[in-house]
Image (tube, rainbow, N blue to C red):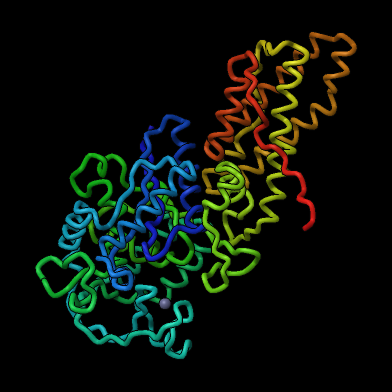
Amino acid sequence: MSNFYITTSIPYVNSEPHIGFGMEILMADVLARYMRQYKTPVIFSTGTDEHGGKIAEKAAEAKITPKEYADKVSQSFRDLLPLLNISNDRFIRTTDPAHEQRAQLIWKNLSQYIYKSTYSGWYCVGHEEYFPEQVVKANNGVCPEHNRPYEQLKEDNYFFKLSAFTPKVKEAIDTGRLQIVPQSRKNEILSLINGGLEDISVSRPKDKIGWGIGVPGDDSQVMYVWFEALMNYITGLGYPEHQDFKQFWPANVQVIGKDILRFHAAIWPAMLLGLGVELPRLLYVHGFITVDNKKISKTLGNVISPKQIVEKYGVDTFRYFFLRHIPSYEDGDFSWDRLEAAYNNELADQLGNAVSRTAAMVSKYQKGIIGDIPAAEHDIGPYRQALEACRFDRALDEVWEQVKGLNQYVDEEKPWELAKAGDEDHLREVLAYLVGALLEIAELLQPFMPTTSDKIQEIFGSGILKEIPGSLFPKHEPQPAT
Ligand SMILES: [Zn+2]
Protein backbone atom coordinates (compact mmCIF):
# COMPACT_ATOMS: atom_id res chain seq x y z
CA MET A 1 0.00 0.00 0.00
CA SER A 2 1.25 3.44 -0.79
CA ASN A 3 2.33 5.90 1.84
CA PHE A 4 0.21 8.72 3.15
CA TYR A 5 1.51 12.20 3.93
CA ILE A 6 -0.80 14.77 5.46
CA THR A 7 -0.10 18.29 6.65
CA THR A 8 -1.90 21.12 8.38
CA SER A 9 -1.04 24.74 7.74
CA ILE A 10 1.57 25.95 10.19
CA PRO A 11 0.04 28.71 12.30
CA TYR A 12 1.83 31.99 12.73
CA VAL A 13 3.06 32.40 16.30
CA ASN A 14 1.63 35.87 16.81
CA SER A 15 -1.22 34.61 18.97
CA GLU A 16 -2.25 31.62 21.04
CA PRO A 17 -4.16 28.70 19.45
CA HIS A 18 -7.89 29.22 18.97
CA ILE A 19 -10.69 26.80 18.13
CA GLY A 20 -10.31 27.34 14.38
CA PHE A 21 -6.84 25.81 14.33
CA GLY A 22 -8.06 23.21 16.82
CA MET A 23 -10.59 22.11 14.22
CA GLU A 24 -8.04 22.12 11.42
CA ILE A 25 -5.61 19.89 13.23
CA LEU A 26 -8.44 17.55 14.23
CA MET A 27 -9.47 17.13 10.63
CA ALA A 28 -5.96 16.13 9.67
CA ASP A 29 -5.80 13.85 12.69
CA VAL A 30 -8.95 12.00 11.61
CA LEU A 31 -7.52 11.26 8.18
CA ALA A 32 -4.17 10.18 9.62
CA ARG A 33 -5.85 7.82 12.08
CA TYR A 34 -8.18 6.50 9.39
CA MET A 35 -5.26 5.62 7.10
CA ARG A 36 -3.36 3.97 9.94
CA GLN A 37 -6.42 1.81 10.65
CA TYR A 38 -5.90 0.35 7.19
CA LYS A 39 -2.20 -0.19 7.91
CA THR A 40 -1.00 2.54 5.59
CA PRO A 41 2.32 4.12 6.62
CA VAL A 42 1.52 7.70 7.58
CA ILE A 43 3.46 10.87 8.19
CA PHE A 44 1.27 13.54 9.72
CA SER A 45 3.01 16.88 10.09
CA THR A 46 2.11 20.14 11.76
CA GLY A 47 4.18 22.94 13.27
CA THR A 48 4.60 26.68 13.63
CA ASP A 49 5.55 29.57 11.36
CA GLU A 50 7.89 31.87 13.26
CA HIS A 51 9.64 34.56 11.25
CA GLY A 52 8.61 38.03 10.11
CA GLY A 53 8.25 41.60 11.26
CA LYS A 54 5.24 41.02 13.40
CA ILE A 55 7.03 38.49 15.57
CA ALA A 56 9.97 40.85 15.93
CA GLU A 57 7.53 43.59 16.92
CA LYS A 58 5.73 41.47 19.51
CA ALA A 59 9.04 40.34 20.95
CA ALA A 60 10.22 43.93 21.25
CA GLU A 61 7.00 44.83 23.09
CA ALA A 62 7.62 41.97 25.50
CA LYS A 63 11.31 42.96 25.77
CA ILE A 64 12.52 39.50 24.75
CA THR A 65 14.27 38.22 21.64
CA PRO A 66 12.17 37.08 18.67
CA LYS A 67 13.37 33.54 19.23
CA GLU A 68 12.32 33.62 22.89
CA TYR A 69 8.94 34.95 21.87
CA ALA A 70 8.56 32.28 19.17
CA ASP A 71 9.61 29.55 21.62
CA LYS A 72 6.90 30.57 24.02
CA VAL A 73 4.03 30.72 21.53
CA SER A 74 5.20 27.67 19.61
CA GLN A 75 5.02 25.76 22.88
CA SER A 76 1.38 26.74 23.30
CA PHE A 77 0.66 25.07 19.95
CA ARG A 78 2.62 22.03 21.02
CA ASP A 79 0.50 21.87 24.18
CA LEU A 80 -2.60 21.72 22.05
CA LEU A 81 -1.58 18.35 20.63
CA PRO A 82 -2.00 16.16 23.73
CA LEU A 83 -5.00 18.25 24.78
CA LEU A 84 -6.87 17.31 21.61
CA ASN A 85 -5.35 13.82 21.38
CA ILE A 86 -3.59 14.58 18.11
CA SER A 87 -1.50 11.80 16.59
CA ASN A 88 0.95 13.91 14.60
CA ASP A 89 4.33 12.39 13.75
CA ARG A 90 6.18 15.64 13.16
CA PHE A 91 6.21 19.14 14.55
CA ILE A 92 8.22 21.48 12.41
CA ARG A 93 9.28 24.98 13.39
CA THR A 94 10.47 27.35 10.71
CA THR A 95 13.26 28.36 13.09
CA ASP A 96 14.60 24.79 13.09
CA PRO A 97 18.11 24.96 11.63
CA ALA A 98 17.23 22.11 9.27
CA HIS A 99 14.32 24.10 7.85
CA GLU A 100 16.46 27.20 7.50
CA GLN A 101 19.19 25.34 5.63
CA ARG A 102 16.82 23.51 3.35
CA ALA A 103 14.85 26.70 2.65
CA GLN A 104 18.09 28.27 1.41
CA LEU A 105 18.70 25.26 -0.79
CA ILE A 106 15.19 25.56 -2.23
CA TRP A 107 15.82 29.24 -2.92
CA LYS A 108 18.95 28.30 -4.85
CA ASN A 109 17.10 25.59 -6.76
CA LEU A 110 14.48 28.15 -7.75
CA SER A 111 17.03 30.80 -8.66
CA GLN A 112 16.29 30.71 -12.38
CA TYR A 113 12.80 32.00 -11.50
CA ILE A 114 13.97 34.62 -9.00
CA TYR A 115 15.08 38.10 -10.02
CA LYS A 116 15.84 41.36 -8.27
CA SER A 117 13.66 44.39 -8.82
CA THR A 118 12.04 47.26 -6.98
CA TYR A 119 8.85 46.72 -5.12
CA SER A 120 6.70 49.71 -4.74
CA GLY A 121 3.41 49.22 -3.06
CA TRP A 122 1.75 48.47 0.22
CA TYR A 123 2.31 46.04 3.07
CA CYS A 124 0.42 45.22 6.25
CA VAL A 125 2.75 43.91 8.89
CA GLY A 126 -0.26 42.55 10.81
CA HIS A 127 -1.02 40.35 7.83
CA GLU A 128 2.62 39.99 6.77
CA GLU A 129 1.20 40.48 3.31
CA TYR A 130 1.55 42.78 0.32
CA PHE A 131 -1.61 44.55 -0.76
CA PRO A 132 -2.58 46.02 -4.13
CA GLU A 133 -3.42 49.69 -4.51
CA GLN A 134 -7.16 49.04 -5.01
CA VAL A 135 -7.49 47.26 -1.66
CA VAL A 136 -5.59 49.98 0.18
CA LYS A 137 -7.74 52.69 -1.42
CA ALA A 138 -10.95 50.84 -0.70
CA ASN A 139 -9.95 50.69 2.97
CA ASN A 140 -8.86 54.34 3.09
CA GLY A 141 -5.28 53.36 3.80
CA VAL A 142 -5.99 51.46 7.01
CA CYS A 143 -6.07 47.67 7.29
CA PRO A 144 -9.51 46.95 8.72
CA GLU A 145 -8.43 43.70 10.31
CA HIS A 146 -5.45 45.14 12.15
CA ASN A 147 -6.61 48.71 12.47
CA ARG A 148 -3.25 50.06 11.37
CA PRO A 149 -2.17 52.02 8.30
CA TYR A 150 -0.70 50.04 5.44
CA GLU A 151 3.01 50.73 5.08
CA GLN A 152 4.06 52.20 1.77
CA LEU A 153 7.11 50.35 0.56
CA LYS A 154 9.59 51.27 -2.09
CA GLU A 155 12.48 48.91 -1.76
CA ASP A 156 14.69 46.45 -3.55
CA ASN A 157 13.24 42.95 -3.34
CA TYR A 158 13.64 39.64 -4.99
CA PHE A 159 10.68 38.52 -7.06
CA PHE A 160 9.45 35.07 -7.94
CA LYS A 161 8.19 34.61 -11.51
CA LEU A 162 4.76 33.43 -10.51
CA SER A 163 3.30 34.72 -13.77
CA ALA A 164 5.35 32.20 -15.75
CA PHE A 165 3.53 29.33 -14.03
CA THR A 166 -0.03 30.54 -14.52
CA PRO A 167 -0.99 28.16 -17.36
CA LYS A 168 0.56 25.13 -15.68
CA VAL A 169 -1.04 25.76 -12.30
CA LYS A 170 -4.39 26.33 -13.96
CA GLU A 171 -4.05 23.13 -15.93
CA ALA A 172 -3.15 21.11 -12.83
CA ILE A 173 -6.25 22.36 -11.04
CA ASP A 174 -8.52 22.04 -14.07
CA THR A 175 -7.51 18.46 -14.73
CA GLY A 176 -7.68 17.46 -11.07
CA ARG A 177 -3.99 16.62 -10.87
CA LEU A 178 -4.18 19.03 -7.96
CA GLN A 179 -7.62 18.45 -6.50
CA ILE A 180 -9.22 21.19 -4.47
CA VAL A 181 -12.24 20.57 -2.29
CA PRO A 182 -14.80 21.95 -1.82
CA GLN A 183 -15.72 22.92 -5.36
CA SER A 184 -16.49 26.50 -4.28
CA ARG A 185 -12.83 27.00 -3.34
CA LYS A 186 -11.68 25.45 -6.57
CA ASN A 187 -13.87 27.92 -8.47
CA GLU A 188 -12.55 30.77 -6.38
CA ILE A 189 -8.91 30.03 -7.12
CA LEU A 190 -9.56 29.36 -10.80
CA SER A 191 -11.20 32.72 -11.20
CA LEU A 192 -8.25 34.37 -9.47
CA ILE A 193 -5.82 32.53 -11.73
CA ASN A 194 -7.87 33.42 -14.81
CA GLY A 195 -7.39 37.03 -13.88
CA GLY A 196 -3.64 36.41 -14.24
CA LEU A 197 -1.00 35.87 -11.58
CA GLU A 198 1.57 38.59 -11.13
CA ASP A 199 5.12 37.99 -10.00
CA ILE A 200 5.42 38.26 -6.24
CA SER A 201 7.98 39.82 -3.98
CA VAL A 202 9.68 37.11 -1.96
CA SER A 203 12.16 39.01 0.17
CA ARG A 204 12.43 42.04 2.44
CA PRO A 205 15.45 44.19 3.21
CA LYS A 206 17.15 42.98 6.35
CA ASP A 207 17.37 46.48 7.76
CA LYS A 208 13.55 46.62 7.82
CA ILE A 209 12.77 43.05 8.82
CA GLY A 210 15.73 41.36 10.41
CA TRP A 211 13.92 38.30 11.74
CA GLY A 212 14.02 35.91 8.83
CA ILE A 213 16.03 33.42 6.85
CA GLY A 214 18.84 35.03 4.89
CA VAL A 215 18.68 35.11 1.11
CA PRO A 216 21.60 33.01 -0.15
CA GLY A 217 24.33 35.22 -1.56
CA ASP A 218 22.76 38.51 -0.45
CA ASP A 219 23.36 39.63 3.13
CA SER A 220 21.06 42.59 2.76
CA GLN A 221 17.87 40.56 2.29
CA VAL A 222 15.80 37.99 4.16
CA MET A 223 13.17 35.72 2.63
CA TYR A 224 9.56 36.83 2.78
CA VAL A 225 8.06 34.84 5.65
CA TRP A 226 5.26 33.30 3.61
CA PHE A 227 7.60 32.13 0.89
CA GLU A 228 9.79 30.15 3.26
CA ALA A 229 6.90 28.98 5.45
CA LEU A 230 5.30 27.15 2.52
CA MET A 231 8.55 25.26 2.05
CA ASN A 232 8.02 23.52 5.41
CA TYR A 233 5.88 20.90 3.71
CA ILE A 234 8.93 19.53 1.94
CA THR A 235 11.77 20.62 4.23
CA GLY A 236 10.03 18.61 6.97
CA LEU A 237 10.46 15.48 4.87
CA GLY A 238 14.08 16.32 4.16
CA TYR A 239 13.84 17.67 0.62
CA PRO A 240 15.60 16.81 -1.59
CA GLU A 241 17.67 13.81 -0.57
CA HIS A 242 16.04 12.19 2.45
CA GLN A 243 14.22 8.85 2.15
CA ASP A 244 11.09 10.34 3.72
CA PHE A 245 10.87 12.88 0.96
CA LYS A 246 11.35 10.21 -1.69
CA GLN A 247 8.80 7.91 -0.11
CA PHE A 248 6.13 10.30 1.18
CA TRP A 249 6.02 13.23 -1.20
CA PRO A 250 3.67 14.23 -2.85
CA ALA A 251 1.38 15.00 0.07
CA ASN A 252 -1.89 13.13 -0.17
CA VAL A 253 -3.83 15.81 1.67
CA GLN A 254 -2.93 19.34 2.73
CA VAL A 255 -5.46 20.84 5.12
CA ILE A 256 -5.76 24.64 5.14
CA GLY A 257 -8.20 27.43 5.99
CA LYS A 258 -9.94 29.42 3.30
CA ASP A 259 -7.99 32.61 4.06
CA ILE A 260 -4.74 31.12 2.79
CA LEU A 261 -6.07 29.54 -0.37
CA ARG A 262 -4.08 31.79 -2.73
CA PHE A 263 -0.79 30.86 -1.05
CA HIS A 264 -1.50 27.14 -1.24
CA ALA A 265 -3.33 26.82 -4.54
CA ALA A 266 -1.37 29.32 -6.64
CA ILE A 267 2.02 30.21 -5.14
CA TRP A 268 2.88 26.84 -3.59
CA PRO A 269 2.14 24.77 -6.74
CA ALA A 270 4.19 27.25 -8.79
CA MET A 271 7.12 26.83 -6.41
CA LEU A 272 6.89 23.06 -6.72
CA LEU A 273 6.67 23.24 -10.50
CA GLY A 274 9.75 25.46 -10.44
CA LEU A 275 11.57 22.82 -8.41
CA GLY A 276 10.39 20.06 -10.71
CA VAL A 277 8.64 18.40 -7.80
CA GLU A 278 5.20 16.75 -7.96
CA LEU A 279 2.16 18.64 -6.76
CA PRO A 280 0.15 17.59 -3.72
CA ARG A 281 -2.81 15.38 -4.57
CA LEU A 282 -5.52 17.15 -2.63
CA LEU A 283 -5.95 20.50 -0.99
CA TYR A 284 -8.80 20.50 1.48
CA VAL A 285 -10.01 23.96 2.44
CA HIS A 286 -12.11 24.34 5.58
CA GLY A 287 -14.21 27.36 6.47
CA PHE A 288 -14.24 29.72 9.42
CA ILE A 289 -15.88 29.37 12.80
CA THR A 290 -17.96 32.11 14.32
CA VAL A 291 -18.98 32.24 17.96
CA ASP A 292 -22.65 33.04 18.52
CA ASN A 293 -22.71 34.02 14.85
CA LYS A 294 -20.09 36.70 15.38
CA LYS A 295 -16.57 36.82 14.02
CA ILE A 296 -14.07 35.72 16.67
CA SER A 297 -12.12 38.74 17.89
CA LYS A 298 -10.24 39.94 20.90
CA THR A 299 -12.14 43.20 20.80
CA LEU A 300 -15.48 41.42 21.04
CA GLY A 301 -14.04 39.30 23.84
CA ASN A 302 -15.47 36.11 22.35
CA VAL A 303 -12.20 34.23 21.91
CA ILE A 304 -12.56 30.68 23.23
CA SER A 305 -9.56 28.48 23.82
CA PRO A 306 -9.79 24.77 23.05
CA LYS A 307 -8.78 24.17 26.66
CA GLN A 308 -11.92 25.78 28.05
CA ILE A 309 -14.07 23.35 26.09
CA VAL A 310 -11.98 20.26 26.77
CA GLU A 311 -11.88 20.95 30.50
CA LYS A 312 -15.63 21.15 30.70
CA TYR A 313 -16.68 18.47 28.20
CA GLY A 314 -13.72 16.19 27.59
CA VAL A 315 -11.64 15.78 24.48
CA ASP A 316 -13.97 13.51 22.54
CA THR A 317 -16.87 15.92 22.88
CA PHE A 318 -14.63 18.64 21.49
CA ARG A 319 -13.66 16.39 18.61
CA TYR A 320 -17.23 15.32 17.97
CA PHE A 321 -18.68 18.81 17.98
CA PHE A 322 -16.19 20.43 15.63
CA LEU A 323 -16.15 17.51 13.22
CA ARG A 324 -19.89 17.02 12.99
CA HIS A 325 -21.51 20.34 13.79
CA ILE A 326 -19.22 22.62 11.83
CA PRO A 327 -19.99 21.86 8.17
CA SER A 328 -16.85 20.46 6.56
CA TYR A 329 -17.37 22.41 3.34
CA GLU A 330 -18.63 25.69 4.77
CA ASP A 331 -18.36 28.13 7.65
CA GLY A 332 -19.94 27.10 10.92
CA ASP A 333 -20.94 28.46 14.28
CA PHE A 334 -19.96 27.53 17.79
CA SER A 335 -22.06 28.34 20.82
CA TRP A 336 -22.02 26.85 24.28
CA ASP A 337 -25.74 26.08 23.87
CA ARG A 338 -25.21 24.13 20.68
CA LEU A 339 -22.34 22.25 22.29
CA GLU A 340 -24.47 21.42 25.34
CA ALA A 341 -27.34 20.25 23.13
CA ALA A 342 -25.04 18.02 21.05
CA TYR A 343 -23.56 16.59 24.23
CA ASN A 344 -26.86 15.79 25.89
CA ASN A 345 -28.93 14.75 22.89
CA GLU A 346 -26.39 12.91 20.80
CA LEU A 347 -23.52 11.79 23.02
CA ALA A 348 -25.39 11.13 26.26
CA ASP A 349 -28.88 10.13 25.05
CA GLN A 350 -27.92 8.32 21.87
CA LEU A 351 -24.39 6.91 21.94
CA GLY A 352 -23.87 6.76 25.70
CA ASN A 353 -27.28 5.29 26.22
CA ALA A 354 -26.85 2.62 23.55
CA VAL A 355 -23.63 1.51 25.24
CA SER A 356 -24.92 1.56 28.80
CA ARG A 357 -28.26 -0.15 28.17
CA THR A 358 -26.58 -2.89 26.12
CA ALA A 359 -24.00 -3.44 28.85
CA ALA A 360 -26.70 -3.45 31.52
CA MET A 361 -28.73 -6.09 29.68
CA VAL A 362 -25.75 -8.33 29.01
CA SER A 363 -24.91 -8.10 32.68
CA LYS A 364 -28.41 -8.64 33.97
CA TYR A 365 -29.64 -11.38 31.63
CA GLN A 366 -26.45 -13.25 30.79
CA LYS A 367 -24.11 -12.59 33.70
CA GLY A 368 -21.83 -10.62 31.38
CA ILE A 369 -21.30 -13.38 28.87
CA ILE A 370 -21.80 -12.14 25.33
CA GLY A 371 -20.98 -15.26 23.37
CA ASP A 372 -20.43 -15.28 19.62
CA ILE A 373 -20.57 -11.79 18.21
CA PRO A 374 -21.83 -11.63 14.62
CA ALA A 375 -19.89 -9.47 12.20
CA ALA A 376 -21.77 -6.28 11.42
CA GLU A 377 -23.37 -6.10 8.00
CA HIS A 378 -23.70 -2.41 7.41
CA ASP A 379 -22.54 -0.87 4.18
CA ILE A 380 -19.69 1.40 5.20
CA GLY A 381 -19.14 2.63 1.64
CA PRO A 382 -20.88 5.98 2.19
CA TYR A 383 -18.83 6.52 5.37
CA ARG A 384 -15.60 5.87 3.56
CA GLN A 385 -16.55 7.99 0.60
CA ALA A 386 -17.46 10.88 2.89
CA LEU A 387 -14.19 10.60 4.76
CA GLU A 388 -12.10 10.39 1.63
CA ALA A 389 -13.78 13.57 0.37
CA CYS A 390 -13.03 15.27 3.72
CA ARG A 391 -16.74 15.37 4.57
CA PHE A 392 -16.17 14.70 8.25
CA ASP A 393 -19.68 15.88 9.07
CA ARG A 394 -21.28 13.40 6.68
CA ALA A 395 -19.11 10.51 7.81
CA LEU A 396 -20.32 11.12 11.37
CA ASP A 397 -23.91 11.43 10.14
CA GLU A 398 -23.48 7.93 8.72
CA VAL A 399 -22.21 6.60 12.04
CA TRP A 400 -25.06 8.29 13.85
CA GLU A 401 -27.64 6.62 11.63
CA GLN A 402 -26.29 3.38 13.02
CA VAL A 403 -26.34 4.64 16.60
CA LYS A 404 -29.95 5.70 16.24
CA GLY A 405 -30.84 2.46 14.48
CA LEU A 406 -29.42 0.53 17.36
CA ASN A 407 -31.57 2.31 19.94
CA GLN A 408 -34.62 1.72 17.74
CA TYR A 409 -33.73 -1.94 17.50
CA VAL A 410 -33.71 -2.21 21.29
CA ASP A 411 -37.08 -0.46 21.51
CA GLU A 412 -38.55 -2.82 18.93
CA GLU A 413 -37.06 -6.09 20.16
CA LYS A 414 -37.74 -5.33 23.83
CA PRO A 415 -35.13 -7.71 25.26
CA TRP A 416 -36.70 -7.37 28.73
CA GLU A 417 -39.86 -9.04 27.38
CA LEU A 418 -37.80 -11.83 25.85
CA ALA A 419 -36.21 -12.31 29.27
CA LYS A 420 -39.59 -12.37 30.97
CA ALA A 421 -40.88 -14.92 28.47
CA GLY A 422 -37.77 -17.05 28.97
CA ASP A 423 -36.85 -16.89 25.27
CA GLU A 424 -33.13 -17.22 25.98
CA ASP A 425 -31.94 -18.09 22.48
CA HIS A 426 -33.62 -15.13 20.89
CA LEU A 427 -32.44 -12.89 23.72
CA ARG A 428 -28.85 -14.04 23.23
CA GLU A 429 -29.11 -13.32 19.52
CA VAL A 430 -30.50 -9.85 20.09
CA LEU A 431 -27.82 -8.92 22.60
CA ALA A 432 -25.04 -10.35 20.46
CA TYR A 433 -26.33 -8.36 17.51
CA LEU A 434 -26.32 -5.19 19.61
CA VAL A 435 -22.76 -5.79 20.72
CA GLY A 436 -21.65 -6.51 17.15
CA ALA A 437 -23.22 -3.26 16.00
CA LEU A 438 -21.59 -1.32 18.84
CA LEU A 439 -18.18 -2.75 18.00
CA GLU A 440 -18.63 -1.67 14.42
CA ILE A 441 -19.61 1.79 15.58
CA ALA A 442 -16.49 1.82 17.73
CA GLU A 443 -14.38 1.01 14.70
CA LEU A 444 -15.97 3.75 12.63
CA LEU A 445 -15.53 6.20 15.49
CA GLN A 446 -11.86 5.31 15.99
CA PRO A 447 -10.49 8.16 13.86
CA PHE A 448 -12.95 10.67 15.29
CA MET A 449 -13.25 9.79 18.97
CA PRO A 450 -10.37 7.43 19.79
CA THR A 451 -10.88 7.40 23.55
CA THR A 452 -14.57 6.60 23.29
CA SER A 453 -13.88 3.98 20.66
CA ASP A 454 -11.28 2.30 22.87
CA LYS A 455 -13.69 2.26 25.80
CA ILE A 456 -16.43 0.56 23.77
CA GLN A 457 -13.86 -2.01 22.63
CA GLU A 458 -12.76 -2.51 26.20
CA ILE A 459 -16.32 -3.07 27.44
CA PHE A 460 -17.45 -5.52 24.77
CA GLY A 461 -14.48 -6.56 22.66
CA SER A 462 -13.42 -9.72 24.51
CA GLY A 463 -16.81 -11.45 24.41
CA ILE A 464 -17.12 -11.09 28.16
CA LEU A 465 -18.51 -7.85 29.42
CA LYS A 466 -16.06 -5.63 31.21
CA GLU A 467 -17.98 -3.24 33.38
CA ILE A 468 -16.42 0.19 33.70
CA PRO A 469 -17.58 2.68 36.28
CA GLY A 470 -19.84 5.54 35.23
CA SER A 471 -21.24 6.13 31.78
CA LEU A 472 -19.33 7.33 28.73
CA PHE A 473 -21.22 10.60 28.55
CA PRO A 474 -23.11 11.27 31.78
CA LYS A 475 -26.05 13.47 31.00
CA HIS A 476 -25.81 17.06 32.22
CA GLU A 477 -28.79 17.97 34.33
CA PRO A 478 -30.27 21.37 33.64
CA GLN A 479 -28.80 24.06 35.88
CA PRO A 480 -31.27 25.76 38.19
CA ALA A 481 -31.99 29.31 37.08
CA THR A 482 -29.94 31.83 38.99
ZN1 LIG B 1 -3.63 43.68 8.20
Q: Quadrant of ligand 1?
A: bottom left
Q: Visible in this render: residue 106?
A: yes
Q: Which of 41/167 is in front?
A: 41
Q: Which of 19/378 is in front?
A: 19
Percent across and percent down for residue 379 are 64, 32
* Location of residue 154 with respect to 101 vertically, above or below: below
Q: Tell me: 218 left or right of 238.
A: left
Q: Which of 146/323 is in front?
A: 146
Q: Quadrant of residue 156?
A: bottom left
Q: Tell me: 455 left or right of 160.
A: right
Residue most extreme to the front: 482
Q: Residue at x 38, y 66 (%)?
A: 14
Q: Quadrant of residue 332?
A: bottom right
The quarter in which the N terminus is drawn is: top left
Q: Visible in this render: residue 402?
A: no
Percent across and percent down for residue 291 are 61, 63
Percent across and percent down for residue 220 are 13, 75
Q: Residue at x 88, y 18 (%)?
A: 417
* Location of residue 21 with respect to 167 vertically, above or below: above
Q: Residue at x 38, y 83 (%)?
A: 132
The quarter in which the C terminus is drawn is: bottom right
Q: Residue at x 76, y 18 (%)?
A: 430
Percent across and percent down for residue 233 are 31, 53
